[in-house]
């Protein structure tokens, strides 16, 4: 990694922490550090499930528990067991918690206004545009990939979203029952695998491989949520699938796609996939691609 780039990121982190007051244990001049203030904002007026909130924010469980105890002691939050699943707990803001959150909102607006007021109109435009780009890039850096069973609720949700999009974009719709199979058994090791992409613990994409012993492997179920498009997720997911294919000894990776999926076609061509003659009878396909992989030793 470029050491100059690493130092730039560190410098940026320091100046942001200093400018927003994250170094002070009285964030926004309130009697609490930034961690407590952030949790009050994330819990929100509708409440939140404890495990999902901790996972989404990536907070250490010990620190998370200490913050919750502190907020409970201040009578800003209350928790209750979820009746449908007593292993889960929900957090809600009390009346005092809602009032404190509203005050934090007001002071956050005040801080943002103070930052902008010290700049010229041109500088404000430059700063806010840069912030939008930085936020987008930071979100991209937070996306993780991992192999997951194709039968989990998140995996099924991704498949449902994928099928719904194909149905809306294909001329004449899409019926998964007519397409070449990619059932759970075929996407489970050693027959295949499924990779899910996640942003703050929530699924934002999927891609799968079907292995055929020494024959070319198939790329299946490649989908990225609309909220995560433009972040380079498709390129990274494809590279992750190729890495697992190489690890499994795959020498050739194949896929077919519909002409309506022009973004995917562009991605495949840009990633080294070459269009070939049809190698299967997929009824929804107009293009067939393959790529020679350098196998990992």
Image (cartoon, grey):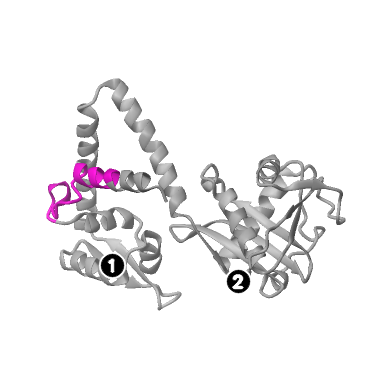
- Is residue 234 positioned above or below 71 on the image? above
Q: What number of labels is visible?
A: 2
Residue 93 image point, x, y percent: 27, 59
Is residue 17 magenta-colored?
yes
| Viewport quadrant of the C terminus | bottom right
- For the question of whether residue 191 can be seen, the reply is yes
Element marked by disc 2: loop
In this image, 12 relative to 138: left or right? Answer: left
Residue drawn where x is 37% and y is 34% of the image:
130
Dot label at residue 190:
none
Find residue 119 and report its image quarter: top left
- Is residue 291 positioned above or below 185 on the image? above
Residue drawn where x is 24% and y is 58% of the image:
35
Give 210 or 42, whichever is nearer the viewer.
210
Crowd around label 1: few <14 · some 14–19 · many ≥20 (10 Å): some
In this image, 2 relative to 174: left or right? Answer: left
In this image, 48 relative to 187: left or right? Answer: left
Mark 1, residue position: 64
> In the rendered structure, which disc, 2 or 1, sits on the residue that comes first in sequence?
1
Residue drawn where x is 27% and y is 44% of the image:
11
- For the question of whether residue 105 can be seen, the reply is no
Residue 9 image point, x, y percent: 33, 46
In space, the residues marked 2 and 1 are separated at their CA atoms by: 29 Å
Magenta range = 11-31
Residue 57 image point, x, y percent: 36, 59
Crowd around label 2: few <14 · some 14–19 · many ≥20 (10 Å): some
Give 248 or 138, whichever is nearer the viewer.
248
């Amino acid at each position: 990694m470029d050491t100059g780039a690493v130092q730039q990121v560190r410098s940026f982190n320091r100046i942001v922490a200093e400018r927003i007051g994250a170094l002070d244990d009285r964030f926004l001049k309130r009697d609490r550090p930034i961690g407590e203030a952030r949790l009050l904002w994330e819990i929100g007026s509708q409440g939140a499930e404890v495990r999902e909130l901790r996972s989404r924010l990536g907070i250490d469980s010990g620190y998370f528990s200490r913050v919750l105890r502190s907020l409970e002691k201040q009578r800003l939050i209350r928790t209750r067991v979820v009746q449908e699943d007593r292993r889960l707990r929900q957090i809600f803001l009390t009346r005092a918690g809602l009032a404190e959150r509203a005050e934090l909102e007001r002071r956050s607006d005040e801080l943002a206004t103070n930052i902008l007021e010290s700049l010229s109109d041109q500088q404000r435009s430059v700063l806010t545009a840069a912030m939008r780009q930085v936020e987008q890039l930071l979100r991209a850096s937070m996306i993780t990939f991992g192999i997951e069973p194709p039968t989990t609720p998140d995996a099924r949700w991704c498949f449902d979203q994928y099928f719904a999009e194909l149905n809306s974009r294909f001329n004449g719709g899409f019926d998964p029952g007519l397409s070449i199979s990619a059932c759970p058994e075929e996407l489970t090791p050693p027959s295949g695998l499924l990779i899910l992409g996640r942003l703050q613990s929530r699924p934002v994409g999927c891609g799968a491989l079907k292995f055929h012993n020494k024959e070319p492997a198939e790329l299946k179920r490649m989908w990225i949520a609309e909220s995560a498009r433009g972040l380079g997720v498709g390129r990274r997911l494809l590279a992750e699938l190729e890495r697992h294919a190489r690890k499994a000894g795959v020498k050739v990776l194949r896929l077919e796609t519909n002409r309506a999926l022009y973004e995917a076609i562009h991605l495949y061509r840009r990633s080294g996939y070459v269009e070939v003659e049809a190698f299967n009878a997929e009824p929804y396909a107009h293009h067939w691609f393959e790529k020679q992989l350098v196998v990992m030793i």
